[in-house]
Structures are given as C-alpha cells and as structure tokens.
Amino acid sequence: MGFVWNFPLFTIVLSLFSGVLCTVLSGKKAKIYTMIYEVILIMMTGAVLSYTMRTGQSFTYVMGEFPAPWGNEIRAGILEALMAVSFLVIMLCSVIAGGRYLKKDLDESRINLYFTLINLMTAALMSIIWTNDIFTGYVFLEILTLTSCGILLVREIGRTTLAAMRYMILNLLGSGLFLLGVVLLYDITGHLLMVNMHQSIVEIAKEPAHLPVLSIALGILTIGLAIKSGLFPFHFWMPDTYGRATPTSAAILSSLVSKAYILLLFKIYYRVVGMEVLKVLPLNRILLILGMCGIIFGSFSAIRARNINRMTAFSSAAQIGYIYMGLGIGGIAGYTAAMFHILAHALTKSQLFLTTPRLAEVSGDRLEFKYMQGSALKCRAAGRTFIISSLSMIGIPILAGFSSKLLFGVAAVDSGSWRTVIAVMVVLAVSSLLNAMYFIRTMVRIYTDPEREKTPDDTDGEVVTAKEPGAEQAQEPDADDEERPYEGQTTGLDYHLPMIVLTAGNVFLGLFSWVIVDLIQRGLAMF
Amino acid sequence: MREGFFKWLDGDYEAMEDFLDAAEVHDEPREAVKAHRKVLVEAADQADRAVVLEEKCRRIFDRLYLAIAVISCVTLIGVLLFTVANLPYFGQENPRTVEVVRRYVEDGLHETGAVNIVSGMILDYRAFDTLGESHVLFTALICVTILLRRDKKNMRKGYEDYYRITADRFFAVSNDMILRKVGLILIPMIFLYGIYILLNGQNSPGGGFSGGAILGAGMIIFAASCGFETTDRFFTRRFFSFASVASLSFYSFAKGYVFITGANSIPNGIPKGTPGAILSGGLILPLDIAVGLVVACTMFGFYSLFRRGSIGSQEV
C-alpha cells in the first residue's frame, strides 16, 4: 500500500477545507488559491490514475479504524481516476476562461463565496466519483445540489434567481426520491456499502416475492437521478438554468454536475445491482426509450430556439439522452460508450458554453441569433472554438463526437437484439442530421457579415425585401462603430489556454479514442 | 412552409414565428419589452373573442394539469403503500439485514467508548457521512448569504427591500415588553439546556446537531426579544467566520487524521476514556462541539440574513 492510496481522501477532505477557507479570503486571493489548488488536485488524481494503470487493479480505502460494512469506504480504479482527472481539468478550464465574466456578473463581495462553492462542489464531485457507499453518495449529492443552485444564484438578476429556484425545487424532488430509493434498498438489503448490497441483491433477486420492491426502489432512485441530470421528460429546466447563468457556472453545470448524477446512477446499476440482475428488471428498456426520446426532442427544441445559449442547453438535453441510451443498451459495450460520451460531451459542452458569451459580448451582450450575425468575424478566436466544438457535437470524424457515436453504434450491434440495432442507428442518423441543422446554421450566421448582406447586389430582390427589417435590427446595437467594423474584443491567454486544452482533449478523444476506450474497459473490469 | 424554412435558415425568424419557441424570453431592452407588451394588451382588448378562446384553453389546460397532478400523486401513493406493505416487518430477525446493526449495538460501546450508540455511529463508524452533512449546512448558509446579503447592488434607494428593512427597525418585535421579559427568563435556561445536550452527546440522546439546534434557537429568541444590538455585541461577523471556519476545519483535519491513521493501520493514540464519563468516546466530544457550533451559527445566520440581510452588524 503506497502513499498514493491516500490521495483520493486528500482530494475530498482538502477540498472541503479549501471551501471553508475561501470564505475568509478576499475575492482575488480566493480565485488564485482555487486555481493553484485545482492544479495540485489534478496532479494527485493523475498520480492515482497512473498508479492504478500500473498495478492493474483498484484499491479500497477504509475511512477510519472500522472495516468496510461498518465504516465508510472509498474505492479508486482506472475509471474513477480517469473521470476525476478529466472533471478537474474541465473545472479548472471553466474557472479560468469564465473569470472575465465573474468580475462582470458578480458583486465583488461575493467572489470569494463563489469560490467557496466551487471548492465544495469539487469535494462533492470527487466523493461521488470515489465513493463505495451509497449513503455517502447521497450526502455529497446534497452538497452538489446546493452548490449548483448557489453558483446559479450569484448572478443576481431576476431570471437567474427564478431559474435557480425552479432548479432547486426539481433537484430537491430528485434528492428526495433518491433518498427514498436508498432507504428502501437499505431496508431490504441491510447494507449501505455497495459491494455488500450487491451480494444481498443477488440473493433477493432469486426470490420472486422481493422483486417488486427491488424494482420499485430502483425505479424511484432512477427517476430521482434522471430529474437531476435532465433525462427526457424532465429536461425542461435546462434552457433557463444554463441559458442565463454566468459562463463558468453554465459550463460546470452542464458538463460536470449532470454527469456526476449519471455516474452515481451508473455506479448503482453496475456495482450495486449488477448486470445479471439488471437483465431481469425492465429498467434498461425504459432508459433506452427515454434516452432516444430525449435525443430527438432535445434536438427539435434546439432547432426552435432563437437564442444561442438556449440552443446549446437543449443540445445538452439531447446529449444526456445519448448517455442514457448507452446505459439502456447495457452490456460492457453500452457502458463503455456511455462513459466515453460523458467525457466527450463534458469537454465539448464546456467549450461551447465558454465560447458563446464571447460571441455575445461582441454583439452587444445579446444572445439572440438575429443580433449575433457576424459576431465570429469580430472575435475570431471564439469563432474558431465554436466551429470545433459544434463539429464535434455533430459528429465529424477526428473529433470526440464522432468516436462516441461510433461506439454507440458498435454497442447497439453488440447488444444482439435487431430492434435495438435499428432503433439506435435510426436515432443516431436522425440526431446527427438535426444537430448539423442547427449547428451549421449557427456557424453560417455568426460568420455572415451583416454589412455585406445589406447591399442588394448580392442577393435577389425578393429575399432582400423580406430581410430588410431583420437586417436593420441587427445593425442597431453596433451602429456607433460603423467606422471600425471588425474591432471586437481581444482574447488573452485566459481564453486561449483553456480552449487549447479543451480542443486538444477533444481531438485526442477523436483521434486516439482506442486509448480511452481501452482505459474505460479496463476500468469497468475492475470497477 | 418550405419557403419559410429556407428563410429561417437564412436567419429570418419572422417567417417561422409559429414554429419557434414561444416560451423563450426576449433579451430586448426593457422599454421595448414594455412597449411591446402594451401593444399586445391593446390588441387583446380589441379582439375579445380571441381572449375568450384563450381563457377557455387555459381553463382546459388548468383542469388537465390538475387531473394529471392528482392522478400521478395517487399513483405514487399507491406504489409506495404497496412497497411498504411488502417490506420486511419491523424488528423481524432477518439474518441478511442485521449483520451491520448487530455490531453497532453489541460492540459499539467498547469500540467507540460512547454510551449513546447513535453518537458513536454517526461520529465514529460513519464519520465521513457526518463530515459531509455538516458541510451541507455550511453550503446552505453560503447560498442564503449570496441570495440575501445586503450590498450596494441590492440596497439602492427606491428599492422595495430598503423600505421593508427600515420599517422592520421601527416595528421590531424587540419593542414588545412581554416578549422581552419572558425572553430574559427563558434564554439562560435554553442556553444551559443546549450546552448540556451538546456536551453529553456521547452519554445520552443528543449531540452536535440537536444541541446546536437548541443553541441556535436560543440565539434567535435572544435576538428577537432583545434586539440585534444586544447580540451584535458578541455575535459579530468576525466571530461568526471564526467559529464556522475553526470548527469545520477542526472537523476536517481531526477526521482526516483518523481516516489516514485508520486506513494505514497506524494507531491514532486517541484515548477512549471510561464510558459514561464526560471525557469519553475519543473524538466524539470535540466533534460534537464543532458540529454544534456550526449548526448554531447556521441557524442564527439564516435568521439574521432573512431579517436584516447581514450576519453581524451592518455591512453596507
């Protein structure tokens, strides 16, 4: 047992301490401290990742002097370490790239509280990733819920407050259902530790009398986590929540928080229930169908959106649908695809949510498409990152989105049921088409010069007359800088560095997907 | 439709107005929104029939909504009742489900040194969960602070809040003579009771959460009956941050130490003491005090933030 074994514990306890510490620091110091601390955390989790890769097996860490079923326990393997590293990297990138907007959106006296919440959220994410105990999962789920409402509220404009209230009510409903599920499971199994629970559940599944209770408990638990992560019928809170939050919060909420809930659900399915018992229950099929509905409806809503952040948020709903579809397909291949998509979507969506505010900023802080015409010409860097991340969302080869779609297809073929294969293939094709429709349209919009379109020579008369009022309105906000048309905002290192990291991650997942797939599969084997 | 679609692709939103997301709020200047609303209202006044139709639709929707809500609630109740009916009976010996509990009950006393098994369980066996739980309270307090704390941004004159807070100062409850006198008699007893419960958590029912809640309630009664001027003499913002930061960091580090020594099987050298004595149960007593402080500070912090928008004296 090496010193590395202690690192998962450090990531949790030190994050909790950092959160408390940030309340007494000034805003600026809290920010610098948080960044340095995140780098240290990345190194620690990286060490855990390399250690588990070297030894080839996971380790359990007893929390305190009492062994497993009586005390708490955390467990680290390749998959957990991989998730932890990527979550922390994305979090650091979001904090750096969104820092500029924190100053604008937040009152100065609240900046240190914001970083308090960020650190507490890190602790919660880490514990949900490492935990081997379902109740510890619940406790830190609560912290995650509260911190995510907090980082929404900080913007203090009416709409974010409203969105945060709605988000909180739904999230508390989700937490309540999850707790109910945990209580029911505890009642029939007598354990809270995941491994022991699994043994009890395998025994219970043999007696048909207990099966209804088991499926109801799991169903309630699944509904709770589905509400929290935004699976199809419960996705309506997403656009308001992500659309108006400060960019760092939007990126973190969409790419990390909803994924953490899914990870916990996956942990319960894979480690607590186990694949054999899961086959007996109808849960997989329901998740598959809901995931598919989520993909289609999310994409349609994204097409209907008139505002770039709402579009991105609805696209998140669709992507969450993909992950649930992977869980629903089941089997090692399905779970691999789902885990891979968690990484791919987290990288891409955080990049999108950090890019759109830059585009909005050069078009006069407007998020509607009609005002954003030509915004990428004013801020070239943001335009580039937007193109990369949207292409990844659509699923263009060499980017992460393509690999994950390929993996979903492979998983469907592996599942062996022809109905699943057809359904998944059709959904993948249709959703790629829909994604392409709204993303490519947005790309064209932001790269179209509003000045050029106004001259009647370029287009035929009919279109111009139809467009005249829209074009005039588009010109209105930046009427005063007519002399210097393309002078947009400058992008400094605080934008380029995170974007380079995220883009590199995206391309790596696309080009060398087999490395990650191999890691995930080794992780699943020891999970 | 087809023509409209291509126009939409070109960025012309009016062409597809019927299809686009109606729930979306426009990000237009406030005056424009108001003017637009005014136009809408005028138009609606003119077209009475449309309004009536809309009312009808809304009524149908409301009824449908109610029906669906009732049906889903009844279904949930039914499902949960069915589940409860199928659960194992309370107190029934079931070899599968008693393994964990048996050790808590039988060996809890000599393993943790606490007579109160619940305290031993939450602060020793499952201390990690409690560590998280005390930070849940802290997180909630931070969120409420973010939402309610007064600052330059939300304290501008002419704001509704401003007058409410001013009014609160004039008509404060602390002007009430009866409340004041009764409070002065009750408060010392409440504090004494709270401290007793807090310090005796390892020996009798109670502990950090319940003792802290009583202390916090005592503080709230104190502030309500004697006014914030009295509590501000000792419960300043500095005191608050010191108490919460010190107790939470103590909790994190003390428990971190126990976790690390326990996992690396190094003896941690914390004496268990004689069960029943006040200094027993190893770390349970100091942890109880830490948790109690956090709970009390959180409760009073909530009250103070809701009542006047700050913890401690004025911060604006």
Image (spheres, grey):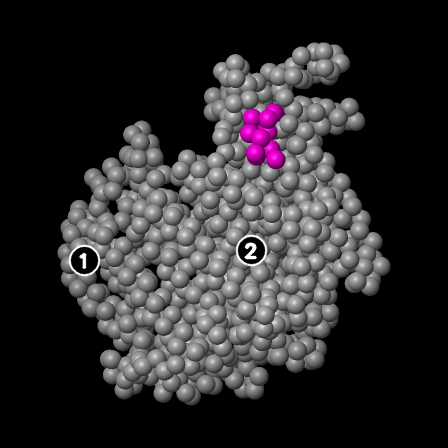
- Viewed as shown, does residue B134 lie left or right of B313? right
Dividing the image into 4 quarters, which one contains the N terminus of chain B?
A: top right
Task: Mark 2 vs mark 1: tell me if same chain.
Answer: no
Q: Are marks 2 and 1 in contact (CB under 8 Å)?
A: no
Dividing the image into 4 quarters, which one contains the C terminus of chain B?
A: top left
According to the picture, the residue beneath numbered tag 1 turns out to be: B183
According to the picture, the residue beneath numbered tag 2 turns out to be: A86
* Residue occupying the point 49% across, 57% down: A42
Does residue A281 lie above or below A234 as drawn? Answer: below
Residue B101: x, y in percent? 48, 82
- Viewed as shown, does residue A58 lie left or right of B16? left
Whether residue A388 appears in magenta in the rendering, the answer is no
C-alpha separation, residue under disc 2 versus residue under disc 1: 55 Å
Magenta-colored span: A373-384
Which one is nearer the viewer's eye here, B312 or B22?
B312
Q: What amino acid is found at the position of numbered circle 1 in the picture?
A: Gly
Q: For mark 2, does the 10 Å Cα neighbourhood hold few (<14), some (14 to 19), or many (20 or more) residues?
A: some
Q: What amino acid is found at the position of numbered circle 2 in the picture?
A: Ser
Q: Tell me, yes or no, if residue A207 can be seen here.
A: yes
Residue A302: x, y in percent? 66, 38
Outermost residue to the right: A418
* Residue occupying the point 80% across, 51% down: A425
